[in-house]
Image (cartoon, grey):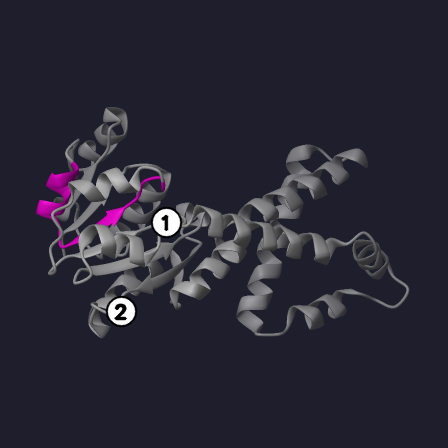
Amino acid sequence: MKIGFVGAGNMASALLNGMLSAGMTDVENVTISDADSAKLAVWKEKGVKVTSDNTEVEANSDLIVFAVKPNVIPGVLAQMKGNPDKIYISIAAGVSVGFLEEKLGSDKKIVRTMPNTPAMVSCGMTVISPNCNLSDEEREMVLRLFDSVGAAMILPEKELEIATAIHGSSPAYIYMMIDAMADAGVRYGLTKANAMKLAAKAVEGSAKMVLQTGIHPEQLKDQVCSPGGTTIAAVCELERTGFRASLQAAIDACVKRNEEMKQ
């Protein structure tokens, strides 16, 4: 399959590296465009065809990924001819399937996606919302593409917008939590590097416990809390200071802002 990327930023690089590593395509079948010649030079050295012309990406590819910021999307779409035999994928936040269909044509194969930044280390989570023009085989193929950088799931577009607040933005919440835990460790005498590793590995291991055991997080939490112990004291303090409510309020704010940005 010939794959094209409009945009050569961090997310495009993460996705393309994952797809190449998984054998989804070969470098000679990839075309990538960007206004930044330095970014293109990196891919040119790897054997990827590079260009500053977005229309060349469309012409050379069976599947085109729009890996640009939401404010750039309208200009990029205006350059596309729109081919009903090609698949057009957007990873831009707030850009709806309807908007993409309006610009490219309602008969086109369009997929709205929202990956998250852990895709850069092949631990990403991507939510996918294809329109009705893709076949079952094409939907599965898109799913496999994003599985190559972690995991992916297909959801209705309405649910994608909610999921974005949980998986798309939540790495920022988690990073804040790791940093806060590490700072607490420093306050009690640990080096920042050691405290950071302890906190990050705890988050990594806890996530694996949820995913691999299938046990509800509430039960896993209870397993760590001994009666009258240190952990339950910490948990009670988190409850007292509104830890859960703060996270839920953050997600509410994210969903609201997504609605405001919607095109």
Tell me the SS state at disc 2. helix
Residue 198 screen position, x and y as percent: 66, 46
In the rendering, at what x and y percent does residue 233 appear? 86, 57
Q: Which residues are magenta?
A: 54-70
Is 56 located above or below residue 262 in the figure? above
Q: Earlier in the sequence, mark 1 or mark 2?
A: 2
> Which residue is depicted at the point 24% across and 50% down?
20
For label 2, the residue is: 140
Residue for point 59% across, 66% down = 209
Is 8 situated left or right of 172 in this image? left
Please identify the residue farthest to the right as the structure is shown.
228
Question: Residue 87 vs residue 191: left or right?
Answer: left
Q: Nearer the viewer, residue 34 or 234?
A: 34
Q: Which residue is mark 1?
A: 263
Foreground residue among 156 and 119: 156
Q: How many marks?
A: 2
The amino acid type of the residue labelled 2 equals: Glu
Question: What residue is at 13 percent from the left and 48 percent from the top?
Answer: 29
Q: Amino acid at mark 1?
A: Gln
The part of the image, by quadrant, that contains residue 38 is: top left
